[in-house]
Amino acid sequence: MFLNINELGSVIYGYQLEQITEGDSSIIIQAIETATEEVKGYLTGNNKKEWFDGRLIYDVAAIFSAKGAERNSLILTHIKTITKWYVVELCNADMIYEQAKERYDRATDYLKKVAKGDVTLPSLPTLSPDSPNQNIKSQAFVYGSRKKFSHE
């Protein structure tokens, strides 16, 4: 896993995790895995035409295979925030629900900006368009016209 349970202390207190999950660490692990998949989804390109516009394409495998201090701290923080949201949505025990929701929204908005190319994270590894790991075949510009219409 990219994040372990002990590292969540910067976004949620241990007693709150214990109270919400009733001591079931599998709930926390599932929330961590869900949050990690959500962040991967924001950083992974797809086959939409927008992804061929020249924006940076991040090497998601390299980002999430990093361990310890090699992990990107901003990505790690966003995963913690999103994990907290998935835990907090179970219950509002000793927690300000709106604050957790607002921080989740802020994290996902930021990740959407990264995905659109509005924000660049220079410390994240990227793939070149010609990389063998990349499934996307870039086609920068296409032009042409339809055949002339005739009523005959």
Image (tube, rainbow, N blue to C red):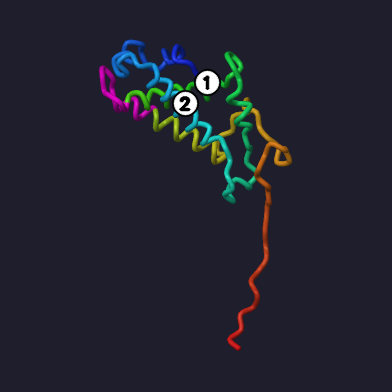
Distance, label 2 to label 1, CA atoms, is 7 Å
Secondary structure beneath label 2: helix
Give the magenta-colored segment's residue range. Answer: 89-103
* Residue 26 on the magenta span: no
- Of label 2 and label 1, which has the lower sequence position? 1
Q: Which residue is mark 2?
A: 33
* Type of amino acid under label 2: Glu
Q: Which mark is residue 1?
A: 1
Name of the residue lying farthest toward the bottom: 152
Name of the residue lying farthest toward the left: 93
The reply to whether discs 2 and 1 touch (Cβ–Cβ < 8 Å) is yes
What residue is rendered at 30% in x and 26% in y? 90
Residue density around tag 2, few if under 14, some if 14–19, many if 20 or more, within 10 Å: some
| Residue 68: image location, x then y, percent | 57, 14
| Residue 38: image location, x then y, percent | 47, 33
Against 144, is 52 above or below?
Answer: above
Side of 103 relative to 65 (left or right)? left
* Type of amino acid under label 1: Met
Secondary structure beneath label 1: loop
* Residue 101 on the magenta span: yes
What residue is rendered at 65% in x and 45% in y? 136
